[in-house]
Image (cartoon, rainbow, N blue to C red):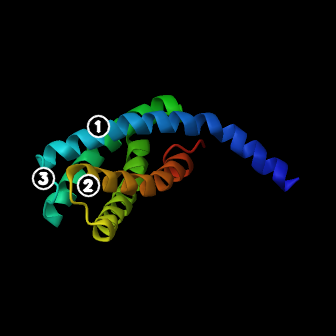
Amino acid sequence: MATLVMLEQRIRYAPSFVRFGIVGLIATIVDFTLFNAALGGQYDPSTSHLLLAATSGFTVATYTSYQLNARYTFRAERNNAVLGRYFAIAVAGVLIHNAALLGLRAVFSPETFVELNATKAGALSVSMFWNYVGYRQFAFRHR
């Protein structure tokens, strides 16, 4: 019986997860565009420059994804309370993202701009699951 309940939940959440992925792709394009613009072509920026570029891109992408997720993914009301909960999850998400970015940078020592962007993609994938669960269960929860 528990297996059927788990299967039912997975099927029920599948469409919203797909929409979340599409919104995530759009937000990722925004994030990477701003990240790369802020780096100005540097593949070996200082840690503070890297974190500023990463946080700037992530912040604008988060606001973009809030608008799209509220409307299309979770079909939720958009108001200041929801926005506040969304950004609370996002703050934790950016901390997870930035920690993963620094960790991956230390492990892989990117030597090209492409490698640095691949490192950022890895960091985004780490924070993606936190964001989905947080947004679904906390930010856009239905009362």
Q: Residues within 10 Å of mark 3 (few under 14, many from 20)?
A: some
In this figure, which residue is indicated by the disc labeled 3?
A: 42
Where residue 60 sits in the image (x, y, percent)? 27, 42
Q: Is residue 75 visible?
A: yes
Which badge, 3 or 2, is on the more N-terminal residue? Answer: 3
Nearer the observer, 69 or 138 = 69
Give the number of the disc on residue 30. Answer: 1
The alpha-carbon separation of the residues under discs 3 and 2 comes to 9 Å
- Name the residue type under label 3: Gln
Give the number of the disc on residue 116. Answer: 2
- Residue at position x 21%, y 50% in the image: 113
Where residue 124 sits in the image (x, y, percent)? 39, 52
Q: Residue furthest top?
A: 72
Q: Is residue 78 visible?
A: no
Compared across the picture, whether 133 is left or right of 23 comes to right
The alpha-carbon separation of the residues under discs 2 and 1 comes to 17 Å
Callout 1: helix, strand or loop? helix
Callout 2: helix, strand or loop? helix
Q: Are the residues flagged by discs 1 and 3 in contact, CB closer than 8 Å?
A: no
Q: Residue furthest right?
A: 1
Give the number of the disc on residue 129. Answer: none
Nearer the observer, 68 or 119 = 119
Compared across the picture, whether 39 is left or right of 23 comes to left
Where residue 40 sits in the image (x, y, percent)? 10, 46
- Residue at position x 25%, y 46% in the image: 57
Compared across the picture, whether 128 is left or right of 112 comes to right
- Name the residue type under label 2: Leu
- Name the residue type under label 1: Val
Where residue 120 sits in the image (x, y, percent)? 32, 54
Q: Nearer the viewer, mark 1 or mark 3?
A: 3
- 105 versus 91 height, above or below: below
